[in-house]
Image: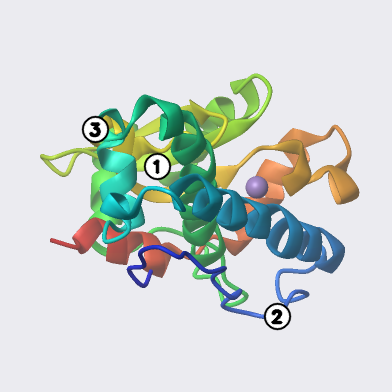
Amino acid sequence: MKKQNYPFTLMPLPYDYDALEPYIDKETMHYHHDKHHQAYVDNLNKALANHPEFHHLTLEELLSNLEKLPAEIQTAVRNNGGGVYNHNLFWLAMTPQPLGKPIGKLAEAINERFGSYEEFKNEFKKAALSRFGSGWAWLVSDKNNRVDIISTPNQNTPLEQGLRPLLPLDVWEHAYYLKYQNRRGDYIDNWFNIVDWQQAEKLFAKE
Ligand code: MN3
């Protein structure tokens, strides 16, 4: 993910809008990326417009230091900065050329923590299904390179908890409702087919 600072711009999709069919449909990708993601970008820029002292900060720096921002823009930056950051990661976490399972050091870490890839998937699905309302499920790693699964409400990021995001799953209804309606479980099962494990491994290996 390219490091950006103010004014933030919408990251283009790294593949065509229909590239993730049949698991994620083209219409959903258009609304999700062109409307929802764009709105987070616009509202983040609006929140920061009158605060030039923060214009040199990257998204990661803003989101890792929310408590240092003026109280009146903290919520807007958490919601919209998180919205920009999480969706950037989300597009990169999927690929039309999936490997099908974790690789390298990350595969080892997942097996160590969860026993197997299948068990990891069960736990991840549980976290994604039990997120009440809108939010995200995540595979994350901590300072000691131990992996875990968490879920966050709204657009909150793992950065706030000092954790490194490796794999995000958007479980807001806007991510799946056009194709799956209320069937969040089917969306999650299908999503595993297009996970970019190479990208997750790259994030895990990053110093
Ligand atoms: Mn979304």
Please determine whether, in this image, residue 50 is positioned above or below residue 3: above
User: What residue is rendered at 39% in x and 33% in y?
Assistant: 149
Residue type at mark 1: give it.
Leu
Please determine whether, in this image, residue 177 is positioned above or below residue 95: above
Residue type at mark 3: give it.
Lys
- Name the disc covering residue 49, or none: none
User: What residue is rendered at 65% in x and 60% in y?
Assistant: 38
Q: Mark 3 points at which residue?
A: 68
Residue placed most toward the observer, 73 or 17: 73
Per the model, the C-alpha gap separating discs 1 and 2 is 25 Å
Residue 46 placement (x, y as % from top left): 55, 50
Q: Mark 2 points at which residue?
A: 16
Please determine whether, in this image, residue 162 is positioned above or below residue 9: above
- Name the disc covering residue 139, or none: 1
Query: What element does badge 1 sit on?
Result: strand
Per the model, the C-alpha gap separating discs 3 and 2 is 38 Å
Nearest to N terminus: mark 1 or mark 2: 2
Q: Nearer the viewer, mark 3 or mark 1?
A: 3
Q: Nearer the viewer, mark 1 or mark 2?
A: 2
Residue placed most toward the observer, 198 or 32: 32
Q: Does the residue labelled 1 lie within 8 Å of ligand 1?
A: no
Query: What element does badge 3 sit on?
Result: helix
Pick the quarter of the image with the C terminus. bottom left
